[in-house]
Amino acid sequence: MPPAIFIDSLVLSSMYILMASGLVLVFSIMGILNFAHGQFYMLGAYAIFYLFQQAGINFFVSLALSAAIVGFVGILIERYIMRPIGQPVQAVVITIALISVFEGLITLIAGPAPRSVTSAFPGTVSIAGVSLSSERLATVIIAVLLIAALYLFIQRTRLGLALRAAAQQPVAAGLFGIQVARVSTLVMGIGCGLAALAGAIMAPMFYVDPWIGGQPLVMALLAIVIGGMGSLGGAVVGGIILGMIGSIVAYYIGFWSQLISFGIVIVILLFRPQGLFGQSEK
Amino acid sequence: MDKAKIKAKLPLILLLAFITFTIIFPLVVKDRFLISILIEAGVMCLFALGFAAVFRSGQFSLGQAAFLAVGGYTGALLASKAGLPFWLSLLGAGLSSAIVAFLLGIVILRMGGLYFSIATLALGEIAIIIAKNWDNVTSGMTGIAVNAPLVKIGELSINFATTKLPYYYIILLLVILAALMFWRIDRSRLGTVVRSVAVAPVMSEQVGIHLMKYRVIMFTLAAFVTGIAGAFYVYYLSWVGPPLFSGAQSTVALIMCVIGGLWSAVSGPIIGAIIVSYFGTMMQIHLEGLRPLVFGVLVIVLIWFMPNGLVELQYRFPAWIKSLFKKKGKGPDAAA
């Protein structure tokens, strides 16, 4: 196996993990799956296209800006559309409708033609005699740093504590003075921001068009069921498994690896219906 | 007849009037394009009814399009390769879809709730991947051209090559049969048990209800109806290929059910399916590029104002009329 394939698997894994952790966060607090999560990924990719490629702002500043902008869009949607509706099934359908809203909007603004973003880290680096694309390496490093920061935020800060409490026992958390509604708004912002970051760091490696959000969403959904709903660690493991299947297994058997990605989800769920790290639900 | 009796019979009268209307409609309105939209709406009705049936057992299937695909391909192969007559291949498509659903159901329905949803999502994707790559059977992306089999009703035989109108009546019949079936189930003991499985799984298990049994029953029934819809759709289009059964189709069923009304087993999905497919097609023609945006915004606005679906109007509308009359009664001209 060439080392480039290994780096590819890490790149794919980090994309899936970033997407999956945002989905898991939103799910654990709001109790719904955000089907428009992939479209926030797409918005992030377009944000980096306009900020970094067109306006020429520094790559890291553009990353932060795109996460902030898209996160704010997520906050607005949670506050003014999802919360007033309240019922979970209806809220899920709202997120499905948002898919076509965002795709339609971006098609209007940016046009349907695919765009490309130039790499912020051109060239290659050689480590121990193996030359690797520095862009891919940088992507993996950024993703690892982001996931570590997210972990520290959830485990080590007061806000993270409030978040965990609201996820476990919303009523009890409310009784202890945590404003659960505000926490869920914040979580929606963080989740959408993470999706945007995933889209932004992946944009230079893939092309950008209004319909790129579908595939990352499906893979993120698979990753969170492999790992177990509502567990961040599970999302990481699920993302790594799917990333390896999508690149290393694909290197050996080609297109049929897709069938394995979907098949393995069903097989894992057969033996552990609650996912690898999840708790069972009836 | 006194007023209460008339009031009790009103839904039945309205329903019969509606069915008569749908029967006469294509004879009066000779708009071929409208009829073709209505035929597709009929297919979508069956599809949405299937989704609603699974939803009533408390499960949220995101891969119903997979059963549309199983029915579609089986129907195509039975009709064009095996040369079976229309009704037999339609039945065969439904049965094969039901068998697949039964075998998968006893396995994947073990996982509750969201795990089931994602497993069905994966199934839908697997169905597409197989359809795209199993060249010997499905011919990949090129698909299979299907000659619609001859329909024989008694002595009468219909040739679809000349007119598409018979399709309208066949799908109308299928929708009415499926609606009757799901309505009867909903009213029966089985329907009550299924609802209890959905609303309170733990309690139902406590009183001795076998959850899996009822989930599998509904899943299989839904797949049977969906499979028939798939085969019919394929005969109508005379072609079968992977794009017909994309994952987006499964979410369309969900949108239809929510717009129509989730809490009614039959009327909600049917109303939603007709409205969404009619306006969806119209928007595609008149708005072109704007369509996804307008469609999404409309769905959000509809859910915003009517979270329980269009079925809610039957309660809102009479109340609105009453409030109008009340205002008139209180007005100055009433006093004069």
Image (cartoon, helix red, strand yellow):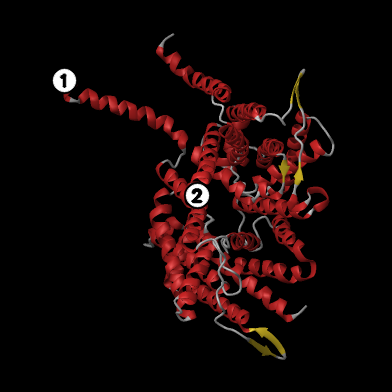
Q: Which of the pair B275/B250 is nearer the observer?
A: B275
Q: Amino acid at mark 2?
A: Arg
**Residue that label 1 marks:** B335
Question: Quick check: B232 left or right of A42?
Answer: right
User: What residue do we see at 60% from left, 52% from top?
Assistant: B114
Judge whether residue A198 can be spotted in this image. Answer: yes
Q: Which mark is residue B291?
A: 2
**Which quadrant does the N terminus of chain A fall into?**
bottom right
Residue A195 percent across, percent down from the top left: 52, 66
Above or below for A200 versus A127: above
Question: Quick check: B259 left or right of A262?
Answer: left
Lower position in the chain sequence, tag 2 or tag 1: 2
Q: Amino acid at mark 1?
A: Ala
Residue A114 percent across, percent down from the top left: 57, 66
- Total numbered labels placed on residues in the image: 2
Above or below for A265 versus B246: below
- Snapshot quadrant of residue B146: top right
Crowd band around label 1 with a 10 angstrom C-alpha radius: few (<14), some (14–19), many (20+): few
User: What residue do we see at 80% from left, 30% from top?
Assistant: B85
